[in-house]
Every structure is written in C-alpha cells, then in structure tokens.
C-alpha cells in the first residue's frame, strides 16, 4: 500500500491590498482560501481550496477574469478529489 505524501504550507495572515493610484482605501480580492493550506502530492491541489501552488502564489497578481475562471473550476476539482479519496473504516 502506497500512501500519498501531503505537504502543509504555513501562510502569514492575509494582507489587505491597497490600490496605489488612488487615495488610501482597502481593496479586497475575493479568495477561495479556507485556511486549510495542505497540498495533495498526487494531484498538486490544495485540499482546502482546490488551487494549485502556482495559482495560490499568483492569486494577487492575476486579472479578475483569471481569478473568476479558477473560481469556476474549484467546485469540480474539489469534488473530483473527494471521489478519489479511498474509503476509510472507523
């Protein structure tokens, strides 16, 4: 039986992003992060939000359209990951 390796990544608390060309005001970027930052070694997806490490790293510099595309894909990614998990006995 081969077990998948799981990597856990610790991220600092979220930072509020401020638009540089405007008077100081908070600009929040929607994120699917649920603070369960654990990457599945087999799929390469975060078990919490379903993003890849590249998507997580680039999230704040992605265009709104890119983030929206990824957000639309996440439910099916997470569902596929749950179907692939082996059943455990209790």
Image (cartoon, grey):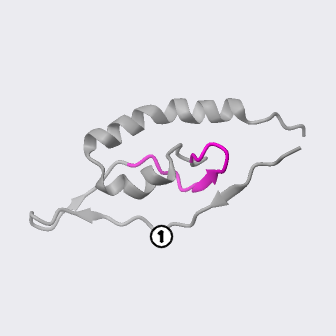
* Quadrant position of the N terminus in the picture: top right
Q: Which residue is mark 1?
A: 12
Give the left or right position of residue 27, taking residue 55 as reference: left
| Residue appearing at x 45%, y 33% in the figure | 73
Residue 60's x, y, as percent? 33, 56
| Residue appearing at x 41%, y 64% in the figure | 14
Residue at the far left in the pictured view? 22
Q: Overall secondary structure of the magenta stretch?
A: loop
Residue 35's x, y, as percent? 54, 56
Q: Was residue 28 drawn as part of the magenta stretch in this picture?
A: no
| Residue appearing at x 57%, y 49% in the figure | 46
* Quadrant position of the C terminus in the picture: top right
Q: Is residue 36 above or below residue 20?
A: above
In depth, the one of 70 and 33 nearer the eye is 70
Q: Secondary structure at mark 1?
A: loop
The residue range painted magenta reads 31-45
Instruction: Identify the image quadrant of residue 79.
Output: top right
Q: Was residue 37 drawn as part of the magenta stretch in this picture?
A: yes
Residue 70's x, y, as percent? 40, 38
Give the left or right position of residue 83, taking residue 87 as reference: left
Give the left or right position of residue 26, taking residue 57 as reference: left
Neighbourhood count class around disc 1 (C-alpha, 10 Å): few under 14, some 14–19, many 20 upward: few
Give the left or right position of residue 59, taking residue 83 as reference: left
Marker count (numbered): 1
| Residue appearing at x 89%, y 37% in the figure | 89
Instruction: Identify the image quadrant of residue 57.
Output: bottom left
In depth, the one of 30 and 59 nearer the eye is 59
Residue 11's x, y, as percent? 51, 66
In depth, the one of 17 and 57 nearer the eye is 57
Q: Is residue 86 above or below residue 64?
A: above
């Amino acid at each position: 039986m081969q077990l998948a390796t799981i990597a856990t990544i610790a991220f600092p608390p979220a930072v509020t992003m401020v638009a540089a060309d405007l008077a100081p005001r908070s600009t929040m970027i929607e994120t699917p992060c649920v603070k369960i930052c654990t990457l599945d070694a087999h799929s390469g997806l975060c078990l919490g939000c379903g993003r890849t490490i590249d998507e997580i790293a680039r999230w704040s510099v992605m265009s709104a359209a890119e983030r929206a595309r990824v957000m639309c894909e996440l439910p099916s990614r997470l569902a596929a990951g749950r179907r692939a998990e082996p059943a455990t006995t209790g």
